Image (tube, helix red, strand yellow):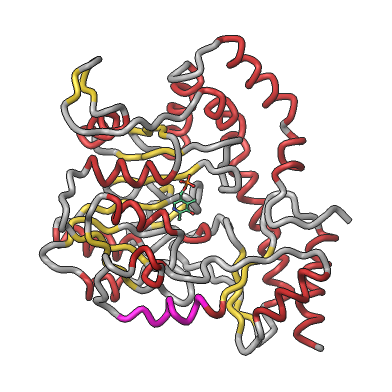
Amino acid sequence: MKNLQLVDLKTQYEKIESEVNAAVLNVLKSTAFINGPEVKSFQAEFENYLDVKHVIPVANGTDALQIALMALGLKPGDEVISPSFTYIATAEVIGLLNLTPIFVDVDKETFCMNPDSLKAAITSKTKAIVPVHLYGHCAPMDEIMEIANEHGIAVIEDTAQGIGSNYTGKDGVSKKAGTIGTVGTTSFFPSKNLGCYGDGGAIMTNDDDLAAMIRMVSNHGQSKRYYHDVIGVNSRLDSIQAAILRIKLKHLDTYLYERNIAANFYNNEFSERPELTVPKTASYSDHGFHQYTLILNGVDRDELMKHLDKKGIPSNIYYPLPVHEQKSFAEIFEDRVSLENTDYLKMKVISLPMHTELDEEQLEFITSSVIEFLDQ
Ligand SMILES: *Cc1c(COP(=O)(O)O)cnc(C)c1O
């Protein structure tokens, strides 16, 4: 059996190796390392895939979030609502820009932002909402957009884990995650569902004026060469990464399908066990399975992880400490609504290996090892 890894990037690379190597060499020979034709082509192809008017490639997913907040013109003291049960980057940029982070709870079934909790947290100071499509499952965008529109609040979809997932609205129309709110952001970190071979990110929007502002902010606040209208940053996707992403984008739907095959295997083996709650997929969403995450019911998580580790099976906890409990946030966040699901999930979740290269032998070994632990 192949060695088990949380994410197997090597085997995935080997399948596209000659194509990737040729594309990278082409960039080297062209010396168009920054803003070259590969970046422009990737941008156009990604716009087409997502069915969105504007994609603005940037250096990473954290920059994408920061630039989106800057382009919306938020001011210190403005409140920005996000879940606490997320990767630190979602909230970090809120703190970095001296905005006030307000954390709301997630749903226990989907791990995504809970609309009732969101409603309870809104004040006249709320200027933006940042739902996260956690683990590849879409947040309930109809409810979130309804609340946002009622109050005139911007919505920034953090799509770093959910790229390629489809959300079907109450009107029956399906859209790609990240293209429903005011603006969407994503990351091309290597382990993400669409990952490059270094750092990368992108911002998506259908709003022409906002897109222009995002382009300006991400390029030193420059309106024309050497004229800087606003304070900006320097955040670019490089041409080598764009060339790799062009190849991987063609495989994204297959990659998502392969993740679903692995998740179905896990679900079939686990769904009858009362000790395990398998991940749910709501009717309005499909699932990108960036992570395959179980909720443990009365199972000693540390002991299970030790048991798996002894057998060479890696597992992980996303996330052991929610943002509102992080030391860095102790002084700046305001405790407004109950985060009981967040506090529950942080103690109960465990994520198993999930990637595009899991074969049946590996899946069989992982699932039987988990069940062996439950039965002992
Ligand atoms: C990975 C991730 C980010 C940040 O992406 P980087 O490219 O690593 O900066 C932001 N939000 C979420 C939810 C993520 O998983």
The quarter of the displayed image where residue 219 is located: top left
The quarter of the displayed image where residue 15 is located: top right
What residue lies at 81% left-to-right and 64% top-to-bottom? 312
Image vertical order of residue 222 relative to residue 138, above or below: above
Image vertical order of residue 175 relative to residue 326, above or below: above
Residue 136 position, x and y percent, is 51, 57
Residue 68 position, x and y percent, is 29, 43
**In the image as oriented, which residue stretches furthest toward the right?**
1
Instruction: Tell whether position 129 is magenta.
Output: no
- Total residue callouts: 0
Relative placement, left or right, of 133 versus 318 is left
**In the image as oriented, which residue stretches furthest toward the top?**
30
What residue lies at 51% left-to-right and 23% top-to-bottom? 239
Residue 81 position, x and y percent, is 27, 63
The quarter of the displayed image where residue 329 is located: bottom left
What residue lies at 22% left-to-right and 75% top-to-bottom? 120
Q: Main secondary structure of the magenta part?
A: helix
What residue lies at 41% left-to-right and 54% top-to-bottom? 89
- Range of residues picked out in magenta: 338-346
Given residues 72 and 108, the one toward you in this image is: 72
Instruction: Tell whether position 339 is magenta.
Output: yes
Q: Quadrant of the C terminus?
A: bottom right
Residue 253 position, x and y percent, is 59, 44
Relative placement, left or right, of 12 versus 61 is right
Image vertical order of residue 180 relative to residue 169, above or below: above
Relative placement, left or right, of 11 versus 170 is right
Q: Quadrant of the N terminus?
A: bottom right
